[in-house]
Image (spheres, coloured by chain):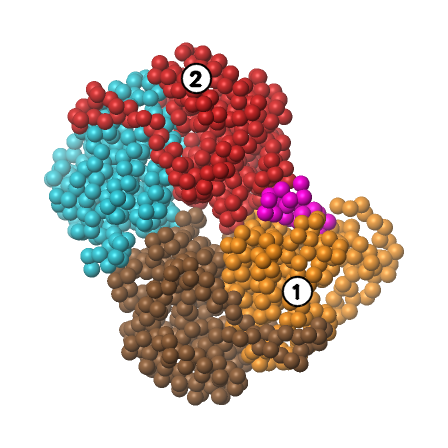
Chain colours: A orange, B brown, C cyan, D red
């Protein structure tokens, strides 16, 4: 862990929570509060208690990719409304609002990049866009990332943060599971590899499809990785849940994840794994 | 359902007719029925959709084993994942269909209370998917085609199931199905519940019985999230459109398997006869295709699912929408 | 279960146990005693309590194969003594004694046969020959059975009863594990199938090699199927063992075995499975 | 050891020299050492064999991770069987050997008490073998050669291990190794304990360190069965002949990897250098062979192991013994 920084001044200025929700710059674990630039400088990790804050897709890419190497692909894709889904509001309205709020076309950003000078493809989810839910656009973007990786003969780095499938696209959102699975298998048949980085949370349809198919799977500390989240398990089964239910740490113990890699170590770790998977097996040596 | 979806359905119907997807006696019945559904599609009420949900869950509806014993000869059930457990919510086995050995998978709900509890109401554990996977691997080695009967409210949402890797098991079961080079025909025979269903439904030909449902979330679950009360399940079902006609219109399934008038529960033998014919006719269509090509098409089929548009403006919703072709 | 037969007369004549060992015709579970012909008639199953007595290899073949169809192969193979193994007695002496006692050249009999008119190959172990231990001869015979099955395009039915590897052949007995595994894989690559019938006991090296590789695995009721037997587990770990430790019934519960098939049902069961695996998929229909 | 075995060893030595199995600096050292062993072979005492057993189990002997960190670059350890557990008694990972990415497997004993308990004294659970299997499958997909370092008293003999399918896991791990089409080099670096060892030792090239042991049963276990007392373990070891020279003579291993004078524990770096060279030289030999051919030869290699005779009289021991050719 990094040396503890003096956060006393920040503490005095912790803003009042709005609607009982703590301010996004206040650490939910230890209560430390940070300015935006402080958080960004620390890769959105609390220097005090190591809590990993959520990272937006573009921030994540900035943290991982060598500067200036990222070239976005398929940015123009937008969700349709094939079911004319309407609950208390129309799906189309929710989409407009999400795009205005996040500046993102949907919950995933893909493109070519290099990490520690090893060329790769990245597919990064953005939880801020409708809870990182996977609809047709996320599915399509992920598939294109696989194809792009295969085409260029590079490894795909997937970074997930998702509440699951996008209900508003009905059965088509479920079909994004087999769709992305097929894309990963095509990539692997082409000799490509995939590294899956599971951020908080990686659940339901995303965990039950491409995220679990990484040749190497790593998780961020404290991330919830579960097909069914703790609340629903509790309600359905009335079982007493273990304290670390579904957390990355218990997933390692149960054999589902290769390692927990803190955000500060993620870039060098990915560099090392990318070198191992690069075609000559000795890239960057 | 909108005009566009209706067009999809008409298009599918005409394709069905021309390529003769399902042959024999059942096909005319199916087409007639589809035609009738098509006539209704202009305005299916919320209640009509909900009726499908109720029929899909009907307690007297035939389950996987009821079909298996009627459709397959010499059926031998196989048990266990060869690692940790036997999951009675997932049936696997070998049987013969028109003389050809088939590997059979399918979720199994229980009929009486004891059986229901033992089979966990058809909710599969990771061990169940792993059992299915080892039987699929055996099928691949021996060139047995695979038939998969889908009938589950969903994968089991319990502590142990999570600890044993529910998400990964569902992902890997799909991955394996995308690798097989033998024909795979799946049919949703009751509830096609989300990840628990798709885990065994990545097939060359996906069928759905007339009164089955196929959905990303249960109407109750959807209602609880969006309306914050399970009471709105009828509205949620109408929004999710989990019925066979809508699912066909969206290109998610390839054909609807007719049921006896009134629903499969009214006549198990006839329901089994219709299902058996649909399975056999699909198998005949697929058996001529070389394994590599079968796999390529299977992946291409799922790769094509989804509806999205391209926008030239990156922060605005597009005005020029170009729907993806199916 | 078959109807209970009148065993009162037999009971009165139960012979005195020799060296505390019950007479081989006395049921160890219920104490019923039978004449040889009675036991043979009942396939060596106690008609009273369903206990499955041990079956010699040739008896087993007689129970399963269609009359007159069995043609033995590789009967001439005999163990050598590559290590010149000597403990309290020489291995060569033990071999002579085993052959004299059992009339068998080693602990396995192989050959072509038909079961319910489906041609197949059988490889049957004989526990009476040095505890069914697997040395070079058992390994070689099993491999030849695989080759014979592949050559004739038929399924291999393996019936095991073994205490494990044959210690007296040292590391060469361990090598029979990979040797038989490779033979099964060759058979499967040739499109062949294997049905594994696990009799009592199927343990150690045999369980940890070919016996576990059946496409279909069935066990006889009450058979001990364990890599390490209960006594050694108890001694090594001081763990309290479950009552059904290692038994066929617990192996089904833990997912290792497809079914428990009683000896009376075994022949029709094998016939059914053999038809499913026969090349045209419809053999005998 | 008898004249015949000595002939075997001489034969092996001459083959070693002519085909140049192990190249470079280490080979002359190895040959010299083998020569010396050969000179001793006429009469190795029980005590000499027992010394090998003691060296193989020496508490300061380097373990898998000690070698891995010295031999491989960029090593990344992989964890978990993707189903139920992480078994610290089995190490798996990826690393680079002379620039080439290798999938590494190996049993790991613990160094201190805490670590020993955590790693279960190097006794693998079924979950450990399943972890190894999933890494082997990954290796196959990416064409990574496999290096397997064997060092275990045996598979863990516990209740849970049995319930989780110890026997089946060992069988299936071997089956998978017999299917791989990438080169596999195994080396017994300490205790090659029975089924627990062979589970990861079905390789194209099987090496053994000079002071390692490889046996179907521990000398203690053997003594307990045959002499009914573990006290006779020295005698049992002499009967089992688990040392490298005997194992080589029987054709079970392909070459002996030299250790520093006095044993690997006296100089870890030098032991790692010698092991690394042996692994690399074996890899070089294998890398030119096409995958299918590699697999064919690998199976043929194991298929040929065993010593038996043919007898024309069926109830007598043969008088005309025809030993199988190696
Ligand atoms: Zn904090
Ligand atoms: Zn009895």
* Camera-side residue of C195 and B118: C195
Q: Indicate the chain on which mark 1 is placed.
A: A
Q: Are marks 1 and 2 on the same chain?
A: no
Height in image: D270 above or below A258?
above
Query: From the viewer's perspective, is the residue at label 1 or at label 2 nearer?
Result: 1
In the picture, residue B292 is in which quadrant? bottom left
Q: Indicate the chain on which mark 2 is placed.
A: D
Which residue in the protein does label 2 denote?
D234
Q: Is residue C278 left or right of residue D222?
A: left
Return the x and y of residue B228 as percentages of the image width and height.
Answer: 61, 75
What is the CA distance from the residue labelled 1 to the residue labelled 2?
Answer: 69 Å
- Which region of the structure is painted magenta? A260-285
Q: Is the C-beta separation of discs 1 and 2 under 8 Å?
A: no
Height in image: B167 above or below A97?
above
Label ID, residue C161: none
Which residue in the protein does label 1 denote?
A73
Whether residue A98 is in magenta: the answer is no
* Camera-side residue of D275 and B232: D275
* Camera-side residue of B192 and B281: B281
Q: Characterize the local packing of mark 2: few (<14), some (14-19) or many (20 or more) Cα atoms within 10 angstroms.
A: many
Return the x and y of residue A58 as percentages of the image width and height.
Answer: 72, 62
Whether residue A268 is in magenta: the answer is yes
Q: Residue at x 52, y 50 (%)?
A: D82
In the picture, residue B278 is in which quadrant? bottom left
Q: Residue at x 68, y 56 (%)?
A: A113
Q: Is residue C36 visible in this depiction of the protein? A: yes
Q: Is residue B191 left or right of residue A256?
A: left
Q: Residue at x 48, y 74 (%)?
A: B251
Q: Is residue C195 left or right of residue C241?
A: left
Position of the C terminus of chain C by quadrant: bottom left
Height in image: B252 above or below C129?
below
């Amino acid at each position: 862990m990094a040396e503890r920084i003096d956060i006393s001044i920040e503490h005095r200025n912790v803003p009042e929570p709005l609607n009982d929700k703590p301010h996004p710059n206040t650490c939910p674990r230890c209560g430390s509060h940070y300015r935006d630039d402080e958080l960004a400088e620390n890769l959105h990790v609390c220097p005090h208690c190591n809590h990993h804050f959520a990272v937006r897709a573009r921030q994540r890419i900035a943290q991982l990719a060598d500067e200036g190497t990222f070239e976005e692909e398929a940015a123009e894709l937008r969700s349709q409304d094939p079911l004319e889904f309407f609950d208390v509001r129309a799906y189309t309205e929710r989409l407009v609002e999400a795009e205005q709020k996040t500046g993102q076309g949907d919950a995933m950003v893909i493109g070519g990049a290099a990490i520690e000078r090893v060329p790769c493809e990245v597919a990064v989810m953005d939880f801020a866009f409708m809870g990182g839910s996977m609809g047709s656009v996320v599915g399509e973007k992920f598939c294109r990332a696989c194809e792009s990786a295969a085409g260029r003969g590079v490894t795909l780095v997937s970074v997930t943060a998702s509440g699951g499938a996008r209900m508003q696209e009905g059965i088509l959102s479920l079909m994004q599971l087999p769709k992305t699975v097929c894309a990963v298998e095509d990539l692997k048949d082409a000799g490509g590899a995939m590294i899956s980085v599971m951020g908080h949370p990686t659940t339901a349809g995303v965990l039950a499809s491409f995220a679990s198919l990484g040749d190497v799977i790593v998780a961020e500390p404290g991330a919830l990785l579960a097909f069914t989240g703790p609340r629903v398990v509790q309600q359905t089964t009335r079982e007493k849940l273990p304290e670390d239910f579904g957390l990355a740490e218990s997933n390692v113990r149960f054999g589902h994840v290769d390692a927990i890699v803190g955000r500060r170590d993620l870039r060098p770790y990915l560099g090392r794994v990318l070198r191992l998977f690069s075609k000559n097996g000795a890239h960057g040596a | 359902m909108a005009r566009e979806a209706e067009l999809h359905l008409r298009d599918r119907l005409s394709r069905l007719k021309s390529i003769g997807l399902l042959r024999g006696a059942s096909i005319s019945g199916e087409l007639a029925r589809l035609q009738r559904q098509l006539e209704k599609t202009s305005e299916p009420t919320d209640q009509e959709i909900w009726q499908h949900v109720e029929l899909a869950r009907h307690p007297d509806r035939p389950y996987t084993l009821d079909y298996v014993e009627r459709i397959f000869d010499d059926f031998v059930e196989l048990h266990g994942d060869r690692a940790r457990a036997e999951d009675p919510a997932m049936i696997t086995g070998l049987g013969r269909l028109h003389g050809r050995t088939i590997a059979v998978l399918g979720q199994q709900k229980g009929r009486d209370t004891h059986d229901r509890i033992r089979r966990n109401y058809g909710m599969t554990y990771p061990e169940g998917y792993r059992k299915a996977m080892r039987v699929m691997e055996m099928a691949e080695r021996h060139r047995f085609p695979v038939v998969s009967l889908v009938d589950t409210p969903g994968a089991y949402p319990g502590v142990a199931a999570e600890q044993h890797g529910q998400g990964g098991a569902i992902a890997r079961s799909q991955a394996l199905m995308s690798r097989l080079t033998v024909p795979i025909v799946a049919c949703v025979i009751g509830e096609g519940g989300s990840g628990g269903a798709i885990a065994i439904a990545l097939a060359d030909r996906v069928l759905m019985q007339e009164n089955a449902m196929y959905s990303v979330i249960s109407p109750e679950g959807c209602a609880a999230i969006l309306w914050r009360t399970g009471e709105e399940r009828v509205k949620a079902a109408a929004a999710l459109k989990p019925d066979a006609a809508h699912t066909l219109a969206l290109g998610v399934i390839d054909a609807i398997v007719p049921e006896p008038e009134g629903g499969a529960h009214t006549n198990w033998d006839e329901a089994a006869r219709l299902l058996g014919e649909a399975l056999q006719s699909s198998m005949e269509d697929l058996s001529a295709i070389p394994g590599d090509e079968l796999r390529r098409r299977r992946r291409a089929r799922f790769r094509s699912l989804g509806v999205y548009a391209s926008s030239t403006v990156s922060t605005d919703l597009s005005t020029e929408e170009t729907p993806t072709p199916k």
